[in-house]
Image (cartoon, rainbow, N blue to C red):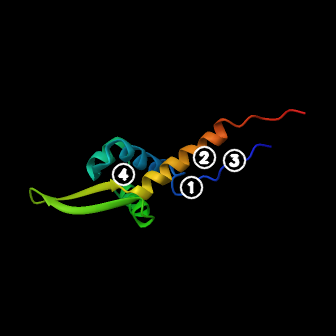
Amino acid sequence: MPSFAPLDPLLHSQLRLAIISLLIGVQEAEFTYIKEKTEASAGNLSVQINKLKDAGYLEVQKTFKHNYPLTTCKITRKGVEAFEAYVVAIKSYINAKPKYA
């Protein structure tokens, strides 16, 4: 039986993985951009972003732009490392070679 690397349960959620995947490519993005790309509801997205923030995978900055609230999410070094480890772990599942008797 092949050994499988453990999957980070925080990134194993479809929406949280989508958020991190987006931020890997752009480094930081506004909440509205992430919401548009993930097609998530504002409430669900906010909850998932907070979980990633609490884990240290994201930094969240709340400011104002033209008198409107602006939330910007930026991936941290820890977030990048977690994503890279997750990719390696997934590859261990994809590349597993079954042993036949």
Label of residue 41 in the image: 4
Disc 3 residue type? Phe
State the image coordinates of residue 13 (x, y, percent, origin top left): 52, 52
Which amino acid is tagged 1? Asp
Give the number of the mark in front: 3 or 4.
3
Which of disc 2 and disc 3 is earlier in sequence?
Answer: 3
In this figure, which residue is indicated by the disc labeled 3?
4
Q: In the rendered image, which residue does mark 1 sit on?
A: 8
Q: Quadrant of residue 42?
A: bottom left
Whole-Å distance between the Cαs marked 3 and 4?
Answer: 33 Å
Nearer the viewer's eye, disc 2 or disc 4? Answer: 2
Per the image, label 1 sits on a secondary structure element best described as loop
Q: Residue 67's x, y, as percent? A: 10, 60
Q: CA distance from mark 3 to mark 1?
A: 12 Å
Amino acid of disc 2 = Ala
Residue pointed to by mark 2? 89
Check the image and report above or below for 73 versus 39: below
Please say if 29 is above or below 68. Answer: above
Distance in Å between CA atoms under marks 3 and 2: 7 Å
